[in-house]
Amino acid sequence: MTNSNKPNLVPVSASQFFMRATRAVVCAGMAGALALSLAACGSSATSSTTSSTTAPSTSAGDAAQVNGEGSIEVIEDGAKSDGTNVNIAEFSIDTSGLFSKRDLDASYSKDKATIVTLADGGSSVSGDGASVDGSTVSITAAGTYVLSGSLSDGRVVVSAKDDDKVQIVLEGAHVTSSTGTALYVKNADKVFLTLAEGSNNAIGSSGAATTEDDHTLDGAIFASDDLTINGTGSLVVTSSAGHGIVGKDELTLVSGAIEVTASGTAIQGKDCVAVKDGTYTLKAGTDGIHAEHDSNGAKGFIYVAGGTFAIESGKDGLDASNDVLVDGGSFEVSAGDDGLHSEYDLAINKGMVRVTKSYEGLEGSTVSVNGGDVDVTASDDGINATGVPSSTNADDTSGAASQNGMQNGQTQDGMTGGPTGGAAPIARDDAMGGTAQGNERGQAPDGGVPDGGMPGMRGGDMPPVGEGSQGQMPMDGNGQGPQGGDSQGQMPMGGNGDGAGNRFMGGGDFENDSTARVTIAGGKLTVTSGGDGIDSNGALEITGGETYVNGPTSDGDGPLDYAGEATVTGGTIIAVGSVGMAEGFGSASTQGSMTVSASGNAGDLVELKDSSGKTLASFTPNKSYGCIIASAPGVTQGGTYALAHGGETTEVTLDSIAYSNVQSFGGKGGFHQGGGGMRGQNVQNGQDTMV
């Protein structure tokens, strides 16, 4: 079929990462506005484009895309070549431009450098461009400066010209300040902080934040311009009253052994935090690594190409107001809130990610696991895709709340949200957006849960009781209210009531959010959750890899939870958990799956075998369970399979592509068997009848 509106196709390198802007950004008359020249952390990059939302599959071509080979076809908002519609606009970042040659080159000539010897009451300078005034060392010109010695209560300040590049080499330098920032980059084009080979260095601050030069100096290291840390030495950063390392422009971490202990955030960037390699031991009162831009929605992202990370954080391990992309490295994260959190897209392509403690393991507008070895433990959802955090998305500056915003515990003025005074999110086209950030926890934009912040409701959660007399909450949805009562205040299971004050139980209470998506295309993913194992406010797509879920034991959550459609077209999945809210895959799948009522205990081997006895998939859960969701390559409609569990074997013949013998109250509203459910409809006189 010929489509006269078919857009041009633009090839984009697979090394690029697509950052979701929102739906409906590109419309008639606005396409030109999206042709922004987006810098990679502020430097040169490709023009912004919009991308198809089709998830990578496990075919040879798609696997090459995931691995960074070949190219990805990117299209503008409108119709794809196959005639289907695309309404998700995304920016692209060329990650190949994040690390410059000089970032990666930690060499220096000591013979040509200015030598600074630090000493209490007697620091000295040999060379040009630096001076000493009491306990303050000032660097005022481009060049290389080699620092050694110690200041027990002093500071180093870089105040150079706008186009000056300054290299500070630490050769056994120790600087501590009792009044705030110990290393302050006041002005320069870029500063390279090089850790000399074999050197041990320390920078610390015990003082509270101060205001200076229109900046709030709240880090032991504070850079108002670009900052790169490289070299092979070590650096210990401490901040007892603030953040550790703060960059208000580009913050680039190339190498070295860096240990940060801070009462606030360990490492914080504005335009971005980009990590090439290195070893990082981070202990933070708030976030381990945080990136947030307060006025440019195209910035504020985290990109990791490699490195080794041990993170203990009071809030999120990684947190970004934009995207989080992991292209390598090894993570061990223990977080008081989310393990890895993004307000927009969160993707793991390579590396090892271990989240040993969290509220929610991986959370973003979309969450994609395309490769690597990922293991998350969460007290609530293991993976949670929330959808874009604005009302009508990036082109909306009105602050009006959307359904997504309401379910995320946010208020309609777009400013107060969960916390008092919580700021509205920055839209991806640089406009101030609609609802306040919070992602169903009523959080402030930095991921914190302020006093009085209340979590919002997501599909499947127990809603607040409506106003008026409270009716009954029967399982069958036939909740008769008090005599003469109206429809207010009833909470029948699966209801979709529209009476005043009603928010009924079941996923049907909120519509599918097409900006939310969980995609698993490769690698190995293991989830252990107290809430939903994998939760999407929109679609769930499994196209490859291995997925294993130790789901909840409470019947208020399920191994899988989604508001849109769930499809499996490739890969292996075994998900176990409670049966009360269980839901399996839908009929749009091309690989067979089964959702089976089957009980077992922690340590019981679960095996999926074909009719010849060949094991197609196996998994040993670490929890007891009441249902099993399983699929693997080779499972087809019409086939007969054996599901061994807890010393028993259940024989399953797939009379449909998505078989189920489970009856639950999960899914898209009310009682259901298999993928879809039957919704209740609120009627008058206090009665909600299942239909």
Image (cartoon, rainbow, N blue to C red):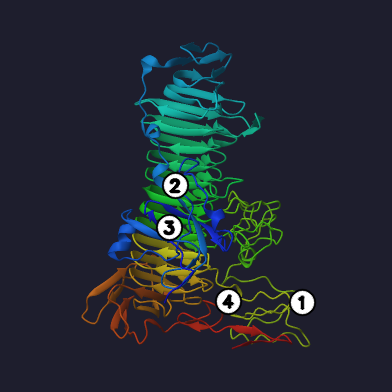
Residue 600 at what x, y percent from top left? 38, 74
Of tags 3 and 2, which is closer to the observer? Answer: 2
Q: Is residue 318 left or right of residue 395?
A: left
Of callouts 2 and 1, the N-terminal one: 2
Distance in Å between CA atoms under marks 2 and 4: 36 Å
Q: Is residue 474 left or right of residue 156?
A: right
The image's mark for residue 318 is none
Of callouts 2 and 4, the N-terminal one: 2
Q: Is residue 677 left or right of residue 57?
A: right
Of callouts 3 and 2, the N-terminal one: 2
Q: Which three-letter amino acid code belongs to the residue tagged 4?
A: Gly
How crowded pointer 3 is (Cα within 10 Å; few <14, some 14-19, many 20+) is rated as many
Q: Which residue is mark 3?
A: 376
Of callouts 4 and 1, the N-terminal one: 1
In-front residue for pair 202/328: 328
Q: Which residue is mark 2?
A: 303
